[in-house]
Amino acid sequence: MTMNRYTIASNADLGGCGHMPRIGPTELVIILFIILIIFGAGRLPEIGSALGRGIREFRRGQSGEDEEGTDDGVAKRTKRGKKV
C-alpha cells in the first residue's frame, strides 16, 4: 500500500489504528457491573424485557410485517402480550 498525505491524515484521525477496538470479556464485565450499580438488581429484569420488546418491534418494523387482526391500527393482545 502506498502512503500519501491523505492516508496518513485519515489514520491519524482514527488514532492510528484504522478500525474499531474489540470489546473483550473484561470490558463486558465492567460494563455490566456499572449497569448493575446504576439501575440496581431489582430493575434489571424490567430493563431486559423492555429492551427485548424494543428489539422485537424494531425487527418487525424492518421486515415490514403488518399487524393482522387490528382495529383502527391497534393490535389486540392477550394478558401475556401476544397477538390474538
Image (cartoon, helix red, strand yellow):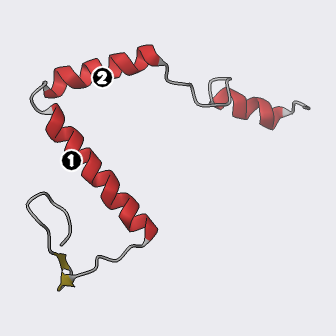
The residue sitting at the right extreme is 2
Measure the C-alpha gap from mark 2 to mark 1: 17 Å
Q: Nearer the viewer, residue 81 or 19?
A: 81
Identify the amino acid type marked 2. Answer: Leu
Identify the amino acid type marked 1. Answer: Ala
* Rendered residue at 15%/28% (across/down): 39
Placement of 25 over or under 13, stated as above or below: above
Q: Position of residue 58 (x, y in %)?
A: 36, 59
Q: Position of residue 33 (x, y in %)?
A: 27, 18
Q: Nearer the viewer, residue 10 or 62?
A: 62
* Rendered residue at 34%/52% (across/down): 55
Q: Which residue is mark 2?
A: 32
Mark 2 or mark 1: whose residue is earlier in sequence: 2
Q: Position of residue 19 (x, y in %)?
A: 64, 31
Q: Along the horizontal axis of the image, is 40 left or right of 27?
A: left
- Picture quarter containing residue 26? top left
Q: Which residue is mark 1?
A: 50
The residue sitting at the top extreme is 26
- Picture quarter containing residue 49? top left
Disc 1, SS: helix
Q: Along the horizontal axis of the image, is 1 left or right of 54?
A: right
Disc 2, SS: helix
* Rendered residue at 71%/34% (across/down): 10
Q: Name the quadrant of the N terminus.
A: top right
- Crowdedness near tag 2: few (<14), some (14–19) or many (≥20) residues, C-alpha within 10 Å: few
* Rendered residue at 33%/56% (across/down): 56
